[in-house]
């Protein structure tokens, strides 16, 4: 069990670092894994969160999501996705998963994806 926990923590740190690097120039994003004691106090916290939310504010698209991460040998996506949706209150559920040594991906509700794509298209038309 300790190996699985360490592997999960490592994956959470890797994803948090990747998001931070990608968005640091735009909004100063500083994603970190949420420590276990904080998660137990507040189930809606997610596996990773931005530590500098006050800089980019509530309008930051990164803050719209409840980030759950899953790195497992046998990924049971339906169960994990249901749990992710159950833990969400006001944010949009987003599950980043990886099957150890194999595939990886992201699960998001269709309406949330379409909303994001609409915003991107709208921004592109404004910038023409």
Image (spheres, rainbow, N blue to C red):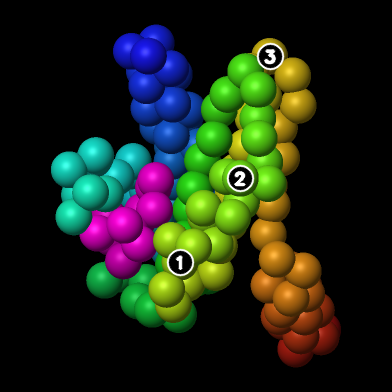
Determine which residue is flagged by label 3. Answer: 101
- Residue 115 lies in quadrant: bottom right
Which mark sits nearer the N-terminus, 1 or 3?
1
Q: Quadrant of the N terminus?
A: top left
From the viewer's perspective, tell me whether residue 35 is left or right of residue 84: left
Q: Is residue 76 above or below residue 26?
A: above
Task: Where is residue 88? Give x, y as percent.
Answer: 45, 66
Crowding at mark 1 (Cα within 10 Å: few <14, some 14-19, many 20+) = some
34 vs 27, nearest the viewer: 34
Which mark sits nearer the N-terminus, 2 or 1?
2
Crowding at mark 2 (Cα within 10 Å: few <14, some 14-19, many 20+) = few
Determine which residue is flagged by label 2. Answer: 79
Q: Quadrant of the C terminus?
A: bottom right
Query: Which residues, given as a range, are shown in magenta?
Result: 42-53
Residue at image point 18% right, 55% down: 41
Residue at image point 81% right, 85% down: 125
User: In front: mark 3 or mark 2?
Assistant: 2
13 vs 98, nearest the viewer: 98
Task: Where is residue 84? Give x, y as percent.
Answer: 52, 55
Q: Is residue 36 magenta?
A: no
Q: Is residue 106 above or below residue 121?
A: above
Q: Which mark is residue 88?
A: 1
Q: CA distance from mark 1 to mark 3?
A: 29 Å
Q: Is residue 11 visible from the viewing direction of this image?
A: yes
Task: Where is residue 126? Give x, y as percent.
Answer: 75, 89
Number of disc labels: 3
From the viewer's perspective, tell me whether residue 42 is left or right of residue 110: left
Secondary structure category for the residue under label 3: loop
């Amino acid at each position: 069990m300790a190996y699985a926990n360490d592997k999960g923590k490592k994956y959470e740190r890797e994803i948090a670092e990747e998001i931070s690097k990608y968005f640091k120039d735009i909004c100063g994003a500083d994603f970190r894994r949420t420590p276990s004691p904080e998660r137990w106090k507040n189930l809606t916290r997610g596996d990773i969160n931005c530590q500098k939310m006050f800089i980019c504010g509530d309008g930051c698209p990164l803050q719209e999501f409840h980030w759950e991460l899953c790195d497992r040998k046998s990924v049971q996506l339906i169960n994990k996705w249901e749990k992710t949706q159950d833990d969400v209150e006001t944010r949009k559920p987003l599950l980043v998963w990886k099957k150890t040594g194999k595939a990886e991906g992201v699960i998001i509700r269709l309406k949330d994806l379409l909303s994001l794509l609409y915003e991107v298209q709208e921004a592109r038309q404004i910038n023409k």
